Image (cartoon, helix red, strand yellow):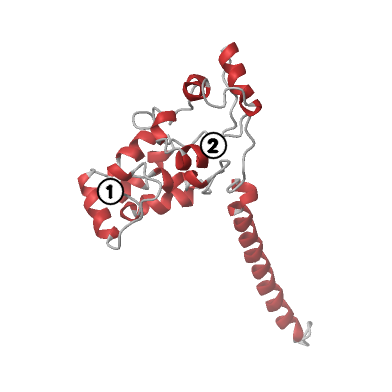
């Protein structure tokens, strides 16, 4: 029986198959890069606020502790947004007539809360508890970055699941002594892994199987 297709058809078929697979792989890779991009995650994007509050000035310049404004961070799932009264404790005397602070004074006069733009906004299907992380030795900087160097606040990390799992799979790499949780300039020592493993046991941090279980964060 004579050959119906030319011999080159086999080569073309193989090239077509491998080419389609290659294009599919590249397409998936591009989608993954877009999903990780700052355009999607909004990482490193400065958020416009009704008052251009500077963490750099208040934390680094004035030495104000995180807990002065975020009062519930050690005992609640929510770190807490400071009420206007917290601002007015100082600004009723300092920069009391500054036009930049008029929204604060208006909020104080009317009793209406300032409508801050949320910077770190997790999806509704993600459960996150600040107090658990703080009391287990995870520093503010680990998730929020060096806020003491941010004149305007931005989201430092992607907040995507793969970023969370990086810590949950190896908590010993990130855990620090509790007394340094609110320290902005603490650096892990050369023996961080040994220290971390010791603190994991001391702070009763669950095993990796529990930390990476779906139900731990998705409830």
Q: Which disc, if any, is residue 207?
A: 1
| Chain-order first, disc 2 or disc 1 | 2
Marks 2 and 1 in Cβ contact (< 8 Å): no
Q: Which disc, if any, is residue 121?
A: 2
Question: In the image, 89: left or right of 211?
Answer: right
Mark 1 surroundings: few (<14), some (14-19) or many (≥20) residues within 10 A = some
Q: CA distance from mark 2 to mark 1?
A: 27 Å
Disc 2 on helix, strand or loop?
A: loop
Identify the image quadrant of residue 6: bottom right
Relative height, residue 96 to residue 159 (above, below): above
Mark 2 surroundings: few (<14), some (14-19) or many (≥20) residues within 10 A = few
Question: In the image, 10: left or right of 97?
Answer: right
Counting from the top left corner in percent of width and height, residue 38 is at 61, 51
Counting from the top left corner in percent of width and height, residue 131 is at 35, 34
Furthest residue toward top:
110
Quarter of the image that includes the C terminus: top left
Q: Nearer the viewer, residue 29 or 139?
A: 139
**Residue sitting at 61 percent across and 62 percent down?**
29
Q: Which disc, if any, is residue 141?
A: none
Quarter of the image that includes the N terminus: bottom right
- Does any portion of residue 210 appear in the rendered image? yes
Report the number of numbered marks: 2
Q: Nearer the viewer, residue 8 or 208?
A: 208
**Residue sitting at 64 percent across and 29 percent down?**
100
- Does any portion of residue 137 appear in the rendered image? no
**Residue sitting at 66 percent across and 61 percent down?**
27
**Residue sitting at 32 percent across and 45 percent down?**
180
Q: Nearer the viewer, residue 57 or 120?
A: 57
Relative height, residue 123 to residue 12 (above, below): above
Q: Nearer the viewer, residue 104 or 28?
A: 104
């Amino acid at each position: 029986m004579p050959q119906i297709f030319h011999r080159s058809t086999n080569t073309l078929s193989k090239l077509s198959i491998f080419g389609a697979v290659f294009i599919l792989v590249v397409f998936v890779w591009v989608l993954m890069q877009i999903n990780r991009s700052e355009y999607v995650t909004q990482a490193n994007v400065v958020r416009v606020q009704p008052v251009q509050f500077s963490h750099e000035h208040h934390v680094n310049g004035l030495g104000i502790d995180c807990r002065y404004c975020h009062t519930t961070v050690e005992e609640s799932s929510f770190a807490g947004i400071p009420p206007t009264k917290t601002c007015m404790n100082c600004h009723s005397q300092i920069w009391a007539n500054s036009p930049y602070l008029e929204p604060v004074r208006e909020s104080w006069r009317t009793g209406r809360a300032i409508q801050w733009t949320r910077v770190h906004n997790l999806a509704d299907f993600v459960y996150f508890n600040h107090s658990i992380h703080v009391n287990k030795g995870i520093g503010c900087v680990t998730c929020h970055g060096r806020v003491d160097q941010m004149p305007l606040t931005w989201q430092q990390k992607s907040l995507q699941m793969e970023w969370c799992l990086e810590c949950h799979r190896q908590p010993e790499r990130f855990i620090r002594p509790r007394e340094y949780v609110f320290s902005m300039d603490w650096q892990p020592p050369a023996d961080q892994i040994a220290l971390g493993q010791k603190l994991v046991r001391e702070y009763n941090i669950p095993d990796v199987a529990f930390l990476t279980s779906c139900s731990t964060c998705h409830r």
